[in-house]
Amino acid sequence: MNEQLRALDDATLPENTPDLDAIRACVEQPLEWARSIRPVAWKQHIRTIAQIVIPNWAYAISSLRAALKDTMLHAPKVSLPIILDCLHHSNATALELYIDLLKRLTADPALYCDDRFFCNMLCSVPTRIANALGLGGTDSWYIDKNYFARLSRQVARNPQQSYTGELLGRVIRQGHADVSIAALYPIVLEQGGKGWPEIWTLAESYSSSGKITETFLRLVQKQDCSIQNAASQLATILFADGKSVRVENFLSHAYLRLANASWTDATTLRIAMTTAIYATEGITARLDHTPLSTESFSMIDKLIRYLIDKWADPVFLKHGSYREQEYITSGLVYAVGYLSSDQIDSIMNETALRGFIHRWFENTDMMRTKLAVVVAESLSQLTEEGDSQLSFGILNDQEDLKYLEIKKLATKRDALTEVNIESACDNVPGPIIEEYHSPQSSDQDQDDEELDPDALITGDQDSDDDDESDLEPYPMEEESDDDTMQGGSDVGVRKKRVKAPVYILDLINYLKDDEDPIKLDIGLSSAEQLIRQKTNVGAELRESAVELARRLIGFPKAYDLDNTSERQKLALATLVAAVPETVAGYMIDQIFDRNASMEQKQTILASIILGVRELAGITTPDDDGVLKDLDKWSAIEEPSAATTTLGKSRVFSRRMDVEKKKKTQRNRLSGLAGPVFFFPLLVGWWEGARGRARSWLGRDALLAERFIMTLNVIMHCATNTPDKGRIVTEYFEFALPLRFLDLPRAVTRAILLGFDIIVNVSYSQQGLLLLQEYAQPLAETKKWLEDIMERVNEDELKQIALRTLAKLMEISMSS
């Protein structure tokens, strides 16, 4: 059969002058042998039909369309890539036939369910057809909104966890979440949401959980049903149980990230909170006096603390939009309403919420003052009784209805209200067409959306931006008329218009934008200052520290930006000094990561040096001066050459004045030097040494020298900390075995500097204690130094060895 199939295919070649009968035989006869033909031969047969028969005979084979479709559907995984490749070089008649075949090939996505390769291919069909046609009708099946709605419905009817989750994730990532979710939503409801929480969990790994959250909330908010019914639907579809972190992320996104969305209001907050509680405790009838479970209270308590951090931020108070402030205030009031008076008092005492309310009262804007009144009176209403409750008399029953409605949110405990939960709502809306613009999340959404390389690009896409408007914006602080009218490069003007990030998440979004050098430059320039501003202010920096470190370490070097390495080191060093317990472990892991480059490892080591020195209260302009400084710290002053002086020198001491001005400062490195920095570094070294992997630091002389110098700096800065003794012990155990190896000069020099620091800095005033606790290591060190004096011709090494030997001799004589 394979030989016969090849003969039929060869008969259709142009050089064999085929007729219509030969074409008909090539299309119809192989269907009868399809099961006995080898896959390789069938693939060649499909390629012959797609690349030779259809382009040359499309005008004459309209009667063979049914046979062509059956041929393609016999092996759709073979047919789909070939047909898509043929779109770019075909005539109009053949193109129409290709599109008709694609409609059949994409009608059932389940045909490709065991191969992840086809997820991207199915998502690229509309843009490939659009590129081939140049334009298309608004009612055609391959238009984005029609195609992805059809695709989503077909996937929803036959859900398969891994394939369905990945396909929907890629559809959502390309920006079609509204159409896709609205199309499959009624089908999922009919299925009772069975298996769908796992599907959405997988979809979030390929797209954005925030985008899925936004789309679902916007969809159910338009339905004609109660808060409880809408929330029960979401809890059933999105969450299998309440033990997942996904519930907390869902609630946090709804309350914090959607503040600037034009469609959100108090209903959004109520649906989100009720959904989260239903997902945690189950969808059951509740009563107002029923207490929250431990899981629900922990979730709401964490959310309230996030809201307080946001609400108390001076930047948010001064520069946040009024809509955002109203939304955050509403969320805070509504969330607090779920807690008992004792729980509220505990939060108020731990977060100093009362002081933050006073800060809002000091604002001169009356609208913001009224928001503060709402928060103060709501908290008083929930925690106090009778005449003790606050009433400022500022809110008017007629003029301030909006603020009074926000105040009422404290008593609307929707998730704990006894209702009859129905299985479905009466009105499930269609696809959501209108869009909104969120200044806070626009950058993130652009990063989450996958750019299709086959997308059609036309000149009409910028038409909205070119339309003139009667409303002219005021110049921003970074922009002036002189900058835009008097010339200057486009890059310079745009750089002035891009604001410096105000929040850590904004900074991360700037650093994520690999395709925008201006945002990268501004983000890197403002990183150090922003990190210092956010240090010890709420939990914002601590929660995003690891992600920020990852972005700073992986900062792209494709653009020729000024002082990239220096700014990168300073930002990472500031981050290390700000949240050492959170970020140091991650950065140390990256040092020993085989995927990290040499430059990244050197940058991390330099940043740790600068961060440790800042924690210890020692500052230097750059890390390159550390080598000279270590020599200076551990050096013993030598007497200067004798000089002849005339007359009698008079010396006026200012020692008393200097002593008076000295201030005692706490060494912030205390308790951190060993467990956070020194010991994890050595653990990574020994793990790599055990396997001697190709990526081990010990294989590179430069990295090994920088690693040991980092240990030396930590040991020096830990001189007056409780970790000093154990650090010195670990250093001896690390360094002394290396004396049997043939070490590079730089590595030997670094090790000797470590010994020098131990005897001349760490135990400079405790020689007897040093001799008592480390007699054996000191004896081995002395022998090594003596060997260096005899065998090595390097003056620099001899100088360090001699200095250490002299101190050891002095200690021995004094004991």
Image (cartoon, rainbow, N blue to C red):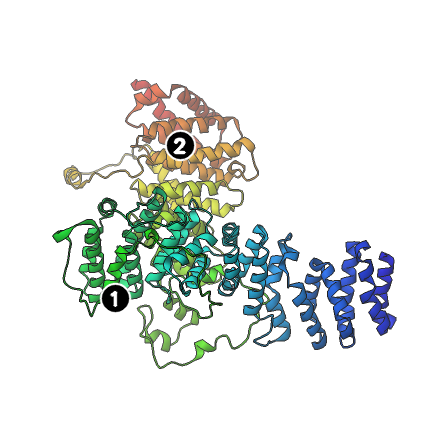
Separation of residues labelled 2 and 1 (CA atoms): 68 Å
Residue 18 shows up from this direction: no
* Number of residues whose C-alpha sits closer than 10 Å to that of mark 1, classed few (under 14), some (14–19) or many (20 or more): few
Q: What is the number of the mark on residue 112? A: none
**Residue 748 pos. (x, y %):** 47, 33
In the rendered structure, the answer to whether residue 760 lies left or right of residue 708 reads left
Q: Check the image and report above or below for 12 versus 251.
A: below
Q: Quarter of the image holding residue 141?
A: bottom right
Q: Is the C terminus in the top left, top right, bottom left or bottom right quadrant?
A: top left
Q: Which residue is mark 1?
A: 402
Residue at the far left in the pictured view: 387
Task: Name the foreground residue: 368 vs 268.
Answer: 268
Q: Check the image and report above or below for 262 versus 780.
A: below
Chain-order first, disc 2 or disc 1: 1
Q: Which residue is mark 2?
A: 754
**Residue 399 pos. (x, y %):** 20, 70
Q: Is the N terminus in the top left, top right, bottom left or bottom right quadrant?
A: bottom right
Q: Amino acid at mark 2?
A: Gly
Callout 1: helix, strand or loop? helix
